[in-house]
Amino acid sequence: MEQVVYADVYLAINFTMDYLALYLTARGMRRPIRPLRLGIAAALGAGYALAALLLPDGNPLSTFTSLAIPFLLVLIAFGFSGWRESLRTLAAFWAISFLLGGAATAVSYLVARWAEKEAVIGGQVETLPADLPFWGILLLGLVVGAIVSFLLRLRSKLPRTVTVEIGEGADAMASLVGLVDSGNLLAEPLSGYPVILVDRKAANFLPSELAFLQNGGTPSLTPRLRLIPYSTPSGEGMLYGYLPRLVKVDGKARTACVAIAPLPDGERQTDVIVPASLV
């Protein structure tokens, strides 16, 4: 039986669902939300969904690609932050995608039945989303909103302070007290790693070639130096940082960038500001 697919509608639906799933993943996992990267990833996912219609069922290439594409979307949207963290993010993206897909399908089916907007195509009952009444779309939005609230509550109970260890080797780790801040969404642009903010007064652990960061001196050319743009209500600027060889948060190994800067007066009771994604 010939099946007609409207490519523009199909792309729009898949782009919207992929973008929403990636956005919810970022909120639920406390990852930086970068709309452009989310949009690029969602566009790739929508394009693949359309191309997948041309692949025959049971094709080994189709099966492999279906498993690889979600991981690629996560990498594009959030960058690579170590295998453990990336796989955790991928698992969250899968779970959220299944929840959204299942909720959308269930609500669409029920609304279509109540509104008598269902059809039998190829022997199967299919819904016609374009014909759903406004109240059906509103109900679907409420279901998605409930899922968002649930996911945000899962990450709401975070510890206020943690112990952060930073160093170049297991035998030379500096131990600092870190304040967990869910509002710290800084990310190193090239790697996408979350950024730990360290007060200059507590940065005695810096490698020799980066010691200038502690006193705010003129940056020297070194491959370990990282430039991290930031934006606050009071303005925009650039932080200097680097990628340490070892980072532990409450004894758990993490991959992160460290930026050195004087912390605001209200946060001087701690040495470090830690993004919630590392907890």
Image (spheres, helix red, strand yellow):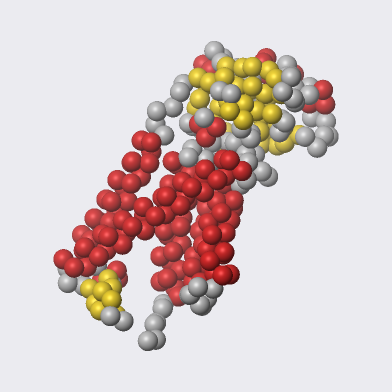
Q: Nearer the viewer, residue 194 or 3?
A: 3
Tally the marks: 0
Q: Is residue 115 left or right of residue 101?
A: left
Q: Residue furthest top?
A: 269
Name the residue located 42 percent from the left edge and 54 percent from the top edge: 97
Asked whether the viewer can see residue 148, the reply is yes
Q: Is residue 5 above or below residue 252?
A: below
Q: Is residue 232 above or below residue 86?
A: above
**Image coordinates for residue 126, horizontal then vertical, percent:** 28, 73
Q: Nearer the viewer, residue 226 or 98?
A: 98
Asked whether the viewer can see residue 263, the reply is no
Q: Say which quarter of the image contains residue 4.
A: bottom left
Q: Is residue 110 left or right of residue 199?
A: left
Name the residue located 25 percent from the left edge and 65 percent from the top edge: 109
Name the residue located 20 percent from the left edge and 59 percent from the top edge: 135
**Image coordinates for residue 142, horizontal then vertical, percent:** 27, 50
Q: Nearer the viewer, residue 95 or 267?
A: 95
Q: Is residue 95 above or below residue 165?
A: below
Q: Is residue 222 left or right of residue 120?
A: right
Q: Say which quarter of the image contains residue 230.
A: top right
Name the residue located 22 percent from the left edge and 73 percent from the top edge: 118
Quadrant position of the N terminus in the picture:
bottom left
**Image coordinates for residue 139, horizontal then vertical, percent:** 24, 55
**Image coordinates for residue 52, horizontal then vertical, percent:** 51, 72
